[in-house]
Image (cartoon, rainbow, N blue to C red):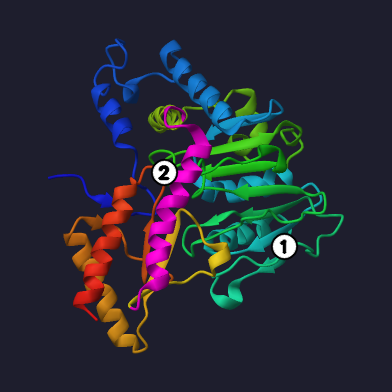
Amino acid sequence: MSRVYNFSAGPAVLPEEVLKEAAEEMLDYKGSGQSVMEMSHRSKVYDQIIKEAEADLRELMNIPDNYKVLFLQGGASQFFAEVPMNMMKNKKAGYILTGQWAKKAFAEAKIYGEAVELASSADKTFSYIPDCSDLPITDDMDYVYICENNTIYGTKFKKLPNTKGKDLVADVSSCFLSEPVDVSKYAVIYGGVQKNVGPAGCVIAIIREDLITDDVLPGTPTMLKWKTQADADSLYNTPPCYTIYICGKVFKWLKKNGGLQAMKELNEKKARILYDFLDESNLFMGTVVKEDRSLMNVPFVCNIEDADKKAEIEAKFIKEATEAGFVNLKGHRSVGGMRASIYNAMPIEGVEKLVEFMKKFEKENA
């Protein structure tokens, strides 16, 4: 069977070149006579893999020297707890709620201290980014938290909030490495890799060094202290070795293809093809205000008044699209409709062919 166009929000499409390389090295990594899957994380061979991955990531993102890069387990969901555990010195922090994952991080923070809702777009089903130019931030807040790109709702912060001098923490799981970022604007920038960087099983955290201390909340498990992990260069315990190895290959693929600026240009081009079609279509429509649209996750619905008819046509579209080789287009269970995630590894022809298919479907179902 030939490969499909995979529009899944995560685990998501990976560069074919990377998968082929990994396949070639599956039984024998660079003459070691073993697979990376079988390799000790304490071995010299593996040490080179993880160090090279970090060096390439630092180069790609231009990470300043006073930031540590950690490859951790537990995904972004565990990190929701690690942030307050390691940063809530005054037991107070501000959260901007722009979707499901920000809400989950907010709920987690409430376990450890006072989490304050600074702004929210819940009033319009998270279809926009709220104005963050003058938030009710108080002096005793330890940090301000955002989910920068909202995978489920398809919104993206185009401008970072004014944190009034407070540390900014950002979950960038679904826009990681999709465009250049100025790391120095963040105290912590982190993301689960399974959307735009590698297979599931790892979260990459880039943390300013002054935040990595023994001064954490009482009861913080040893494993979840950033200092434990930083002091051991992400090797305190067995890390997600194979996932990190694939991430390293993706970093090399990104460097070879022009880095993050080239990715941004390509991603803008791909997104424009899909959004332009949605804007002129009579049957399909996007759900996000234009100025806050994500380049990575594009949610859309059928523009039909009758709810039953709408559900019927959307189900038909997803079924026929899947049969035609466009898979995982069903929207998140909490919002319904459809969603196309068009991460770095989605080729431009995948988006072009999807739009072609949508045009055909619209003609047939007008």
Work out whether 212 lies above or below 49: below
Q: Is 14 on the left or on the right of 74, as rendered?
A: left
Q: Tell me the quarter of the picture where residue 249 sits.
A: top left
Magenta region, residue range: 255-282
**Which residue type carries mark 1?**
Cys
Of all residues, the one furthest to the bottom in this rendering is 306
Q: Residue at x 38, y 39 (%)?
A: 199
User: How many numbered tags mark residues here?
Assistant: 2
Secondary structure of the residue carrying numbered label 1: loop
| Quarter of the figure with the C terminus | bottom left
Q: Residue at x 58, y 46 (%)?
A: 79
Secondary structure of the residue carrying numbered label 2: loop
Residue bearing mark 2: 344
Q: Residues within 10 Å of mark 1 (few under 14, many from 20)?
A: some
Front one among 206 and 178: 178
Q: CA distance from mark 1 to mark 2?
A: 28 Å
Q: Which mark is residue 132?
A: 1
